[in-house]
Amino acid sequence: ARAAKREELAKERAEAKKNQEEKGTPIGTLIQDVRIDEIYLLEVEHLSNFFPSSGDGIENHMIGVGTSYLHPLAGDDSSGGVFTKLSSSVHSAVSGDSKKKTHYNKLIGAHECILSDLVRKPGAPGVVQKTSAYTRAGARKDLHFNPKTVNAAIVTCGGLCPGLNNVVREITNGLVHLYGVKGKIYGIRGGFNGFVDEVQYPPIELTPELVEDIHHKGGTILSSSRGGFDLDKILNFIRKKKINQIYVIGGGGNHPGG
């Protein structure tokens, strides 16, 4: 009798799972007294609050990536958010209606978020259930910078830690191969000192060829240091080199400087 009961329960669960999959609902039991009524997004300040976009109207497409996808347009719910694969040619490029094609298989919308309070308890009737949420990272539909006019600088500051060269390498490769940056990518030597004293710490022009094997080396190829922050001299360097993107790789003491 117990074996028969177990078999019956297993059959009921399998049937329920099948029905939920057909309806597109998650597996499990729907509970009515656990919910989230209000979500408060902890927004990240947009760069446009500080200076206008030079990439206004430029679609975000990965350069040099063969596979392209048809993506749902903003405000168009007919696709259900599904990205449809269009091409797998190594040399394929986005063409035609660029607003519908991308090399990303996922673009992040304005209100996509990660909930901060994941633990939920059944709430009393009439009590509003609230949580804050974090802005989700990822590729957006439009670029803020025009890749043709980008000059970037990468600097490593503070104490050494594993993976610094990997970060330098991937930023360089990403700027060139994914975004098609046409300007220069400067490696700033000796931490913030490299902005201040070009004679003792001449910058390195980073290229994919130069950084190809640096992830096999320890430390940082740019060298690092603590201190050396002189805002006026750093700004002079930035203006002279026409730098509009700076990547500060370091800890909590260096990011405020960035």
Image (tube, grey):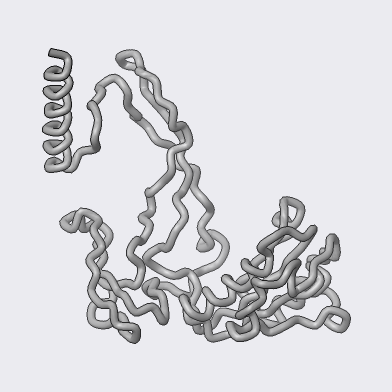
The total of numbered circles placed on residues is 0
Residue at 42% x, 63% y is: 139
Determine whether 134 is above or below 143 in the image. above
Task: Point out the image quarter for the C terminus.
Answer: bottom right
Residue at 52% x, 51% y is: 44
Determine whether 209 is above or below 235 in the image. below
Residue at 51% x, 69% y is: 52
Question: x and y percent of residue 63 in the render?
Answer: 42, 79
Question: x and y percent of residue 29 in the render?
Answer: 23, 26
Residue in the foreground of this view, choosing between 180 and 27: 27
Looking at the image, can residue 81 be seen? yes
Question: x and y percent of residue 116 in the render?
Answer: 48, 36
Residue in the foreground of this view, choosing between 253 and 220: 220
Looking at the image, can residue 99 be seen? no
Q: Residue furthest right?
A: 200
Determine whether 244 is above or below 89 in the image. above
Q: Quadrant of residue 122?
A: top left
In the image, is 16 to the left or to the right of 215?
Answer: left
Q: Quadrant of residue 115?
A: top left
In the image, is 70 to the left or to the right of 39?
Answer: left
Residue at 70% x, 77% y is: 187
Task: Point out the image quarter for the N terminus.
Answer: top left
Residue in the foreground of this view, choosing between 13 and 74: 13
In the image, is 129 to the left or to the right of 187?
Answer: left
